[in-house]
Each structure stands twice: as C-alpha cells, then as structure tokens.
Amino acid sequence: MDTVAETRTTITVRPDLADYRGLLKVLNLMEKESQVELKNDVYSISSWTATGIQQAGLAHPYYPKQARIVAETVRAARDRVPTVYVGGGKGRVSGGANAGQLLFGNEFGGDRNAFGNANAFPNGGFRFPPRTSREGRGNTGYWIFPTLKAMQPEIKRKWFEAVNKVLDNWARTP
C-alpha cells in the first residue's frame, strides 16, 4: 500500500499504481455499466478495509479516546482501486484538537524528549503514546499501518478478483 498525504490532517491509503497504469487505461475504455460494476465491487473492498482499520483503532492500547476519535473518521472511497481516507477536521477532544491533528501522533507516537519535552503536558502526562519502532523509511505505527499490512494480501486478492470478473464480463459482451 502507498500512502499519500493530501493535507497535514488527512491520509489517503491506496495501492501504488505504477505497475498498473496499462490496466487502468483499459478499465477507462470499458462502458459505463462495467465501470460502475467495478467501482461497486471495489467499494465493498474499501468498506471492508475501513471497518478493519476502525476496529483496530477501537482496540488501541494507548490513548483509546484519541484513537476512537480518529477511527470515527475512517471512510471508504468509491474508486477503481481500494481507497480509504483517514483523518480530517471531524471530532474534537478537550483542548480543541480535531481528528486530523491527532492522527499522526496517535498512529506513530511522539518522541518523549523532543523540543525540551514539548510533547508533555504541564501535569506530566504526554500528548501521544511512545514513538513506535522504525521500519523502512518510517515507523511501524500502532493500528492503521499494521492493520493495512495484515489486510494487504486479502485486499490485493479481492481487487484482482473484482477486476478479472469485470474484464471477463466486458470481454463476453458483444
């Protein structure tokens, strides 16, 4: 899965499509009915993925109130490829932060010693859980990215099934 930061408060999760450009061009050539059928099938995959992410957020071991607010913003998109949006301006916690402002700190944690302990409240509590371990060019995350990593093989299988079904039906249509 590839992630694209649309704004500082929202992430879009969708596959890296570099290897599928030719396939997407073919899908654009299909008649509207086939495209709608594909988008409906893919929307069910995106909804299944969004539900898995939401459930993982509700079981977040640290700062469950923050995670619940972020999890409530997870939504599926209707597209040709499985796409899920997380974050945005919805939800508020005491202090006025919205879900998008909590998103990255709740997912990846915060450095306990950064900026002279700016990550701590005056009462000694911390704004976010401890920073997660490094993985690749980033961090592992607590619930969004580990869930996506676990779901990825099934997402890919279901998507290829949906595409093949629509292409087979399209090829049979005179």
Image (cartoon, grey):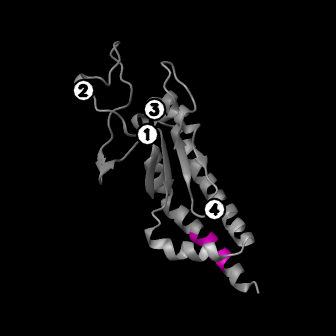
- Image quadrant holding the C terminus, namely bottom right
The 10 Å Cα crowd at callout 3, few under 14, some 14 to 19, many 20 or more, is many
Is 166 included in the stretch rendered in magenta? yes
* Relative vertical location of residue 34 with respect to residue 107 in this rendering, above or below: below
How far is disc 1 from disc 4 in space, using C-alphas?
A: 26 Å
Q: Residues within 10 Å of mark 2 (few under 14, many from 20)?
A: few
Q: Marks 1 and 2, how far apart in space?
A: 20 Å
Please give the range of residues in magenta.
Answer: 160-167
For the point 53% across and 66% down, the residue is: 156
In the rendered image, which residue does mark 1 sit on? 8
Above or below 122: residue 157: below
Q: Judge the density around disc 4: few (<14), some (14-19), many (≥20) Cα neighbours within 10 Å.
A: many
The residue under label 1 is which amino acid type? Arg
Q: Secondary structure at mark 3?
A: helix
Q: CA distance from mark 4 to mark 3?
A: 28 Å
Q: Nearer the viewer, mark 3 or mark 1?
A: 1
Residue found 55% across the figure and 72% down from its top: 24
Residue 51 visible (yes or no): no
Q: What's the mark number on residue 102?
A: 3
Mark 2 sits on what residue? 115
Q: Earlier in the sequence, mark 3 or mark 1?
A: 1
Q: Residue type at mark 4: give it.
A: Val
Q: Earlier in the sequence, mark 4 or mark 2?
A: 4
Residue identifier under label 4: 42
Residue at mark 4 to residue at mark 2: CA–CA distance: 43 Å
SS for callout 2: helix
User: Which is nearer the N-term, disc 2 or disc 3?
Assistant: 3
